């Protein structure tokens, strides 16, 4: 272990009620610097997504509900990748509690709703796309979750690449939605399911 770094697994107490639930969902104890990077990354990537979709011309062809679904899903995926990559989220979702495995798998499974929204609203009822990606998601999540700890990262990366390649060649979408699969599987299979040590600079005594 480097002398200038330390691993901090301590989870700070959270307030009662809704504020506490929200803090636990995002990861208790998030630092100001983590929040600043998350906010800056969210704004920058959201602007890039909007600019790209406007440049493609697809934005003007979508209905109001289609635009709303794409906007909400895009913000959720960009924000979710950043949030789940923070030390605060890693500490919380990979704490030594037997309930965390169930919590992680439920979190991943809930994202089938994203697939339904995109497949049925934006892709006008493309059930093969929905079911194919749901199978990739649930199978990938099970493999990563039950893989031995020291192999989780490369297994998650393999599952991510396999899902992206399947989407590229067999579950095709319009090019304007080409970002969906990489961000979707990155958020869930890598950022959320892979435990990583919450490293911090060692405080001088």
Image (spheres, grey):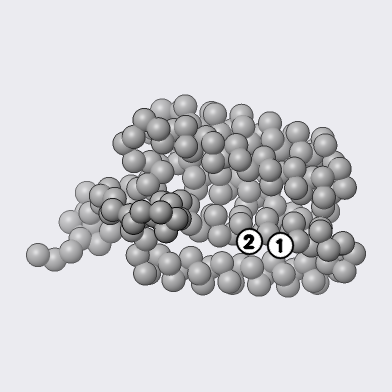
**Is residue 62 shown left or right of residue 204?**
right
Task: Say the numbered circle drawn on residue 75.
Answer: 2
Mark 1 packing: few (<14 Cα in 10 Å), some, or many (20+)? some
The residue located at (23%, 57%) in the rendering is 5
Q: How many labels does the image show?
A: 2
Determine the image quadrant of residue 64. bottom right
- Tell which of 205 and 99 is nearer to you: 99
Residue 37: image location, x then y, percent: 45, 68
Q: Can residue 83 be seen at all in this image of the molecule?
A: yes
For label 1, the residue is 71
Quarter holding the C terminus? bottom left
Hey, which residue is sitting farthest left in the picture?
A: 205
Residue 76: image location, x then y, percent: 61, 57
Separation of marks 2 and 1 at Cα, in angstroms: 6 Å
Residue 91: image location, x then y, percent: 35, 48
The answer to whether residue 104 is above or below residue 20 is above
The residue located at (74%, 56%) in the rendering is 69
Could you say whether the residue bearing mark 2 is in a helix, strand or loop? helix
The reply to whether callout 2 and callout 1 are in contact (CB within 8 Å) is yes
């Amino acid at each position: 272990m480097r002398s200038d770094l330390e691993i901090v697994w301590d989870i700070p107490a959270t307030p009662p009620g809704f504020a506490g639930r929200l803090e636990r969902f995002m990861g208790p104890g998030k630092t100001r610097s983590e929040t600043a990077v998350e906010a800056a990354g969210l704004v920058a990537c959201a602007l890039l997504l909007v600019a790209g979709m406007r440049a493609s011309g697809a934005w003007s062809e979508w209905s109001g509900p289609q635009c709303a679904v794409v906007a909400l899903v895009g913000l959720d995926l960009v924000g979710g990748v950043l949030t789940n990559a923070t030390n605060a989220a890693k500490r919380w979702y990979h704490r030594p509690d037997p309930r965390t495995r169930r919590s992680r798998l439920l979190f991943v499974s809930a994202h089938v709703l994203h697939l339904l929204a995109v497949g049925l609203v934006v892709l006008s009822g493309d059930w093969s796309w929905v079911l194919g990606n749901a199978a990739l998601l649930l199978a990938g999540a099970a493999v990563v979750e039950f893989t031995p700890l020291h192999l989780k990262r490369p297994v998650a990366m393999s599952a991510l690449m396999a899902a992206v390649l399947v989407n590229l060649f067999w579950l095709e979408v319009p090019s304007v939605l080409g970002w969906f699969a990489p961000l979707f599987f990155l958020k869930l299979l890598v950022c959320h399911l892979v435990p990583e040590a919450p490293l911090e600079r060692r405080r001088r005594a």
